[in-house]
Image (cartoon, helix red, strand yellow):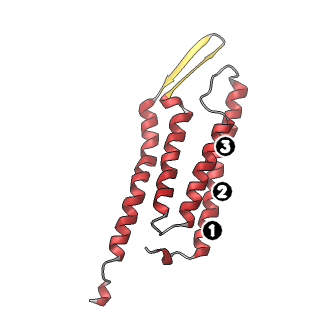
Amino acid sequence: MSATAYSLNFRISRAVIAVLFNLVVWVLVPAFLLGQLESGLPSAPLAFSTDFIYTFGAIITALQAIGALTMGMALSVPFVSGSYIAEAYYLYSAVEGGVFSFSVYGWGITLSFPTLLFLLMLPTLFNALKAPIAYFLDQSEASLPSPEAV
């Protein structure tokens, strides 16, 4: 689809929805979970902090919002792909690459789940590759003559 196929009102409403959704998913829920972890396991060294959550939440939200505002344009592709890459890095960094170690009351516990982490990151990385491919396929179909014109 070309950029004119999406009205400005549609793109703005989609950007507002993206901002609200991303704030909940990437900021509010992780901040709540971090608070619960810090209060329940005060000695656990966590790889992320509230600054990390707010920074990546802002980056992901801004990239998604700009991608929604420029939807249908070539300019949206790097923003959408960048947001997916930022999401994958956020997941990877938050769980220290799939190895989570902490000690409670003298007991050392290590959870190792790099394969599960890879499976969690796979759809996000797939979407990072899908965004430019989908844009170029849509553009190539848009350049074809319509069947009614033949």
If the image is split into quadrants, where does the C terminus sit? bottom left
Label 2 belongs to which residue?
Answer: 20
Residue 90 screen position, x and y as percent: 54, 40
Label 1 belongs to which residue?
Answer: 13
- Number of numbered labels in the structure image: 3
If the image is split into quadrants, where does the N terminus sit? bottom left
Residue 69 screen position, x and y as percent: 57, 66
Question: Would you say residue 25 is visible in this rendering?
Answer: no
Q: Is residue 106 left or right of residue 134?
A: right
Identity of the amino acid at label 2? Leu
Discs 1, 2 touching: Cβ within 8 Å: no
Q: Work out whether 23 lies above or below 33.
A: below
Secondary structure of the residue carrying tag 1 is helix
Q: Work out whether 128 lies above or below 134.
A: above
Spatial CA distance of label 3 from label 1 is 23 Å
Question: Would you say residue 132 is visible in this rendering?
Answer: yes
Identity of the amino acid at label 1? Ser
Taking depth in this image into account, of 147 and 51 the one nearest to the observer is 51
Q: Residue at x 33, y 77 (%)?
A: 143
Identity of the amino acid at label 3? Tyr
Nearest-to-viewer mark from 3 and 2: 3
Label 3 belongs to which residue?
Answer: 54
Q: Local crowd at mark 3 within 10 Å, few (<14), some, or many (≥20)?
A: some
Residue 61 screen position, x and y as percent: 61, 53
Taking depth in this image into account, of 36 and 19 the one nearest to the observer is 19
Taking depth in this image into account, of 107 and 141 the one nearest to the observer is 141
Q: Residue at x 52, y 29 (%)?
A: 96
Nearest-to-viewer mark from 3 and 1: 3
First along the sequence among labels 3 and 2? 2
Secondary structure of the residue carrying tag 3 is helix
